[in-house]
Image (spheres, grey):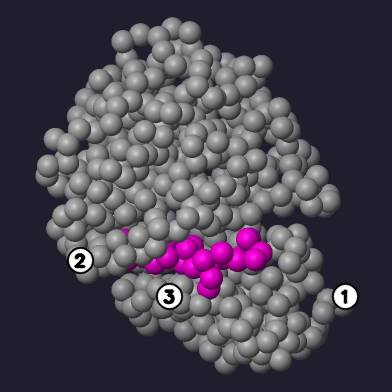
Amino acid sequence: MKNLYKYIFAAMFTLGTTTSCSDFLDESPKGVIDKDKAFSRPDQMVTSAYAMLGDCWYSYPFNLWPYGDLASDDCLKGGSGTTDTGYHPMEIWSTMTSTPGEFDELWYRLFCAVSRCNRALLSLEQYGNDKLGEETCKQRVAEVKFLRAHFYYKLITMFRQVPWIDENVTANNLQEQTRNDEFTYEELFGKIINDFKEAYDVLPDVQTDKNRVNKIAAASYLAKCYLTLAYGDGYEATNGYDHINKDYMQKVVEYTKVVKDDPNYGYLEDYGDIFLPEEKNSKESIFAVQTSDYKEDNTTYGRANWSNMLNGVWGMWSCGWDFHKPSQDLVNAFKTKNGLPEFDDYNKTIDYPINGSPNAQKWDPRLFHTVGMPTFPYKYEKEYTLTKANSRTPNTYGYYCSMKEVPQRSKGETYDGSWQAFAMNDYVFRYTDVMLMRAEALIETDNLSEARTIINDIRQRAKNSVDKHIAYAENQCEIALYPETYFQDKTTARKCLRWERRLELAMENGRYFDLRRWGIASETLNAYFAKEQNDVYDGQTYAQYLKDAHYTPGKNEFYPIPYNQLYYVPGLYKQNKGY
């Protein structure tokens, strides 16, 4: 079978209208296939559901970068100033309300994706066995339930209390009668887990068409669900290390072992290669939203990653809008002393490396793969060296830029009209992330030794990732493995785990959700706001807007239900606490 993503545009245009979130049209639009004919093509309906994985835009990014990175201590918004886009409340929290259009668009688009999944399930139920055969139909049902659970995981991660709209609700047209408080947080997670479990039980380890979801991706998601639930209900007072459910943690250990034991996945040898488009489907990638360049799929613009379209650096790309800017706190976190993190002292002073000027301060090599800095090559290419001119608003957002989500400049742009985008896959799960989830669960189930082995394997890969791409920073890098003494007690082991997740997965859209899971968001973010507002780089101050920032536990853990959704059917939805 040909690669699935080559059919995506055809599926979107053929089925897009008939699989939208609304049935309000009384007459069928001209030039599109009618509903009955669409439903009679179950495999195309499944493809239409897959197409929603990348049906994103900068104002509703499905990778959630404004909510997982910008809302954390890793990232500043960037752009032309604090009013550029509606994302500023996410970086200061104190002004957040339910009214930003970005919330409404994200909610709507994710439920459109859920709707496509439900309609595909109804099509499979009615026509699947006859058109596809019983075995293929069973597998397609499992794939679509995986996809529905994927979109619901994003919804519950963002908005917590969301309405559960499945194929039965869709078939009976009960969407406008389905409340968002019908099920508890744990019950909603149970429904998501059930969908992933059905996928896990049915899907093969490897698909003939490798762009379809498989058993290993389902195992990774099951581990993530149980890891999230293991800490509590998401609100800081009843979440975190004092509320750990060891049965759920054991589930994480079990499902991550499935991933660990599969021979098709593993650590890519060089850390830098993970973020190059030519390695986007390597053994490191368990599940990723697929993209393509127009030269690959013979379309006008390619299947670009539109979530990250704002995140190219200023002056380097034709339309580099300079969003997603690493914080000084993140840069400082990469400091090492004798090769190990400076857990307690990392943020006492503002430091940054300068190319060609090594000094006593050493850095974890992953800094140079993650953060673009003046004087250093942009994504390893010396002919594209960054300067201070590559920052759009340095007095507001400083001089650092993000590098993981962009290709090398010499490779060109997937789309370079009035907007610009790249054919960079979005990792949903990469192998190292799943192994760090395993290490986290091992610590909480009292297997500190294996957790140390996993974390040290990851650090060894970082240590080996200098010569190929960042040899120019060799004299500034120093990283060592954790000695046994760091894993003699849970408190220190947890600190190592948390640090490793931050450095390894920096700027990959999940930092805030980690802080929330661990129950340390308010402590971490309020300390960060107090320090980061004093940023200075080579005499230029910035980030002073953070003087107005404050994170309120008991409210800010989750984002508010969007205003437009809350009042679309008055009284149907209940707002989250504090908003």
Numbered disc 3: secondary structure: helix
- Mark 1 sits on what residue? 31
Dot 3, crowdedness within 10 Å: few (<14), some or many (≥20)?
Answer: many
Instruction: Say whether disc 1 or disc 2 marks the residue closer to the N-terminus.
Output: 1
Where does the image place residue 307, in percent across and percent down from the top left?
60, 49
Dot 1, crowdedness within 10 Å: few (<14), some or many (≥20)?
Answer: few
Numbered disc 1: secondary structure: loop
Is residue 237 visible in the rendered image? The answer is no
**Label disc, if present, on residue 519 of the rendered structure:** none
- Image quadrant of residue 391? top right
Is residue 240 visible in the rendered image? The answer is yes
Find the distance from the CA under tag 1 to the CA under tag 3.
Answer: 39 Å
Part of the protein shown in magenta: 203-228
Where does the image place residue 311, in percent across and percent down from the top left?
58, 38
Dot 2, crowdedness within 10 Å: few (<14), some or many (≥20)?
Answer: some
Q: Is residue 543 above or below residue 281?
A: above
Instruction: Decide whether residue 225 is among the magenta residues.
Output: yes
- Mark 2 sits on what residue? 245
Q: Is residue 252 above or below residue 317?
A: below
Instruction: Decide whether residue 294 is among the magenta residues.
Output: no
- Mark 3 sits on what residue? 197
Q: Is residue 540 above or below residue 403?
A: above
- Name which residue lies at 50% across and 34% down: 270
